[in-house]
């Protein structure tokens, strides 16, 4: 855990946010939903607590949310102008899940694990030494 104080933006730059909180964990998630939501081999999400550690500094009205109907809580948050994935507040985790690529800079912690490994696409890159979990750790 370490303190994180950073800014982030979407691809078009219309949505901007600031995060001030504690970086709890950083996972690559290979589940099918994350693959679909990102269009690539895995999502890379940083969990920052508490819930109110995020402040939208521009473009909050452009945010859209898509909840997978059959999912317990999986939803995607994105810019309606450019489609970039953006942070989502998750009350069950008392925190904010931040797509690491939306950050303008390097987060204070490195990826700690690959989760939902059993759902990965064969072609997904994985050439590192961090632990893997078939689902959640
Ligand atoms: Zn945008
Ligand atoms: Zn996932």
Image: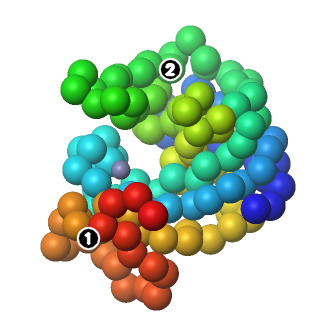
**Residue 54 visible, this orientation:** no
Asked if disc 2 is less than 8 Å from ligand 1, the answer is no
Q: Coloured how?
A: rainbow
Q: Position of residue 57 (x, y in %)?
A: 73, 25
Q: Position of residue 45 (x, y in %)?
A: 51, 53
8, above or below 69, in the image: below
Q: Nearer the viewer, residue 31 or 106?
A: 31
- Indicate the quadrant where residue 64 lies: top left
Asked if disc 1 is less than 8 Å from ligand 2, the answer is no
Dot 1 corresponds to which residue? 124
22 displayed left or right of 128: right
Q: Nearer the viewer, residue 91 or 61?
A: 91
- Indicate the quadrant where residue 25 lies: bottom right
Q: Residue at x 43, y 85 (%)?
A: 128
130 displayed left or right of 15: left
Q: Position of residue 8 (x, y in %)?
A: 66, 42
46, above or below 16, in the image: below
Q: Secondary structure at mark 2?
A: strand
Q: Residue at x 34, y 29 (%)?
A: 72
Q: Residues within 10 Å of mark 2 (few under 14, many from 20)?
A: some
Dot 2 corresponds to which residue? 63
Q: Position of residue 127 (x, y in %)?
A: 37, 85
39, above or below 115, in the image: above
**Residue 71 visible, this orientation:** yes
Q: Are marks 2 and 1 in contact (CB under 8 Å)?
A: no
Q: Secondary structure at mark 1?
A: loop
Reading the chain from its start, which is encountered first: label 2 or label 1?
2
Q: Could you tell me which quadrant the C terminus lies in?
A: bottom left
Q: Residues within 10 Å of mark 1 (few under 14, many from 20)?
A: few
Q: Could you tell me which quadrant the N terminus lies in?
A: bottom right
């Amino acid at each position: 855990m370490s303190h994180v104080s950073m800014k982030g933006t979407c691809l078009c730059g219309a949505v901007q946010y600031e995060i001030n909180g504690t970086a709890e964990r950083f996972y690559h998630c290979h589940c099918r939903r994350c693959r679909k939501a990102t269009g690539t081999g895995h999502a890379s999400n940083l969990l920052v607590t508490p819930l109110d550690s995020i402040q939208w500094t521009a473009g909050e009205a452009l945010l859209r949310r898509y909840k997978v109907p059959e999912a317990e809580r999986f939803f995607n948050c994105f810019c309606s102008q450019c489609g970039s994935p953006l942070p989502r507040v998750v009350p069950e985790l008392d925190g904010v899940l931040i797509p690491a690529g939306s950050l303008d800079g390097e987060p204070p912690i490195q990826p700690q694990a690959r989760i939902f490994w059993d759902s990965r696409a064969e072609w997904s890159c994985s050439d590192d030494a961090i632990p893997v979990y078939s689902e959640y750790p």
